[in-house]
Amino acid sequence: MVYKAEYIWIDGTEPVAKLRSKTKIIANGVEPGLWGFDGSSTSQAEGHSSDRVLQPVASYPDPIRGGDNLLVLCEVLNIDGTPHRSNTRALLRPIAERYAAQEPLFGIEQEYTFFQGHRPLGFPDSGYPAPQGSYYCGVGAGDIHGRAVVEEHLDNCLAAGLSISGINAEVMPGQWEFQVGPLSPLEVADQLWVARWLLHRTAEDAGITVTLDAKPAKGDWNGAGAHTNFSTRAMREGYDAIIEACESLGRDDKPLEHIRSYGAGVESRLTGAHETAPWNEYSYGVSNRGASVRIPWQVEVDKKGYIEDRRPNANVDPYVVTALMVDTCCAALEKANLG
């Protein structure tokens, strides 16, 4: 007997990487192993030397095929066993290990937009729908578009064992969100990539496309982000660590360093309008969705908890954003003896 293993990896497309996958038939009782692919077809090699290697790093039950079949998330390696330059997971791993004692946790809020043809789902063939206001967490066919796919995606994620903590309709028609976490840096990034793959795969069957574009509709419409909630053990125990983490994200050249890696098109979304701070100004505040980093009101009341970095785009690489936040915040907390 055999099972199907869907090998999933992140390609080398720039400025926004795409997901790729292919199926391997494996004998029962045999673990998924290394497998090769043509990197010249995924922007990860030249044609004259195109072999690249898939190394399984995490596996999940396949909710689409069912049975004993698996989804297998992979890192991309060169043929000499070194991480490929597109392999950002390999960059996160040593940072996560270095600060593991601080017990960093993440929850990522993944916004996305459904498209039917060239327009967001729910937009009329010409012109625009009614202005924003009634769509966020709405109900009814006049305001909500794509719920059947959203619910199927949620069920698929749960059946795969992913730590999905919620879903909701977002501010623009055809725009939705799911949340992953709280999990450790590697776990949250791995699971977000698999959840993205399942989203594209689920929508594919419905004839709907998914975009993670930062500003999928021009004009007076919200963009799409991946708000990143972050805490360490010290932050979950005291308020001084909360403030130090917020301060560390605004020191020296950190704001620009983070913004440059928070996703393509970040300037089009972080304008200072539509619940964003300007991309070139750093700020933090309690219950302030117009700040770069928000401290939830309950965190201030409890004097412990987490912070929300509102700057990452929907198309951000979760391996990159988690690496940046751990490296910046945990180093500062360690220096301040709050680690």
Image: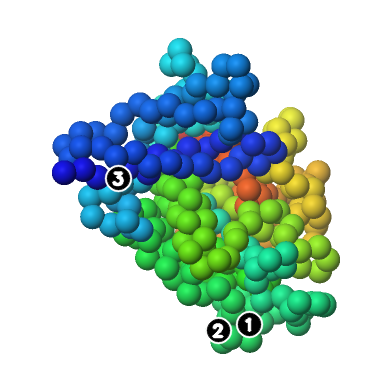
Q: Which residue is depicted at the point 47% across and 29% down?
A: 37
Label 1: which residue? 143
Q: Position of residue 174 (x, y in %)?
A: 63, 71
Snapshot colouring? rainbow
Counting from the top left corner in percent of width and height, residue 97 is at: 41, 27
Q: Secondary structure at mark 3?
A: strand
Say which of 26 and 87 sits in front: 26
Towards the viewer: 284 or 166: 166
Secondary structure under the numbered disc 1 in the rendered image: loop
Which one is in front, 108 or 75? 75
**Pointer 1 with pointer 2, Cβ within 8 A:** yes
Mark 1 or 3, closer to the camera: 3
Residue 255 or residue 116, whichever sits in front: 116
Look at the picture and state if 143 lies above or below 70: below
Amino acid type of the residue that numbered disc 2 sits on in the rendered structure: Val
Q: CA distance from mark 1 to mark 2?
A: 6 Å
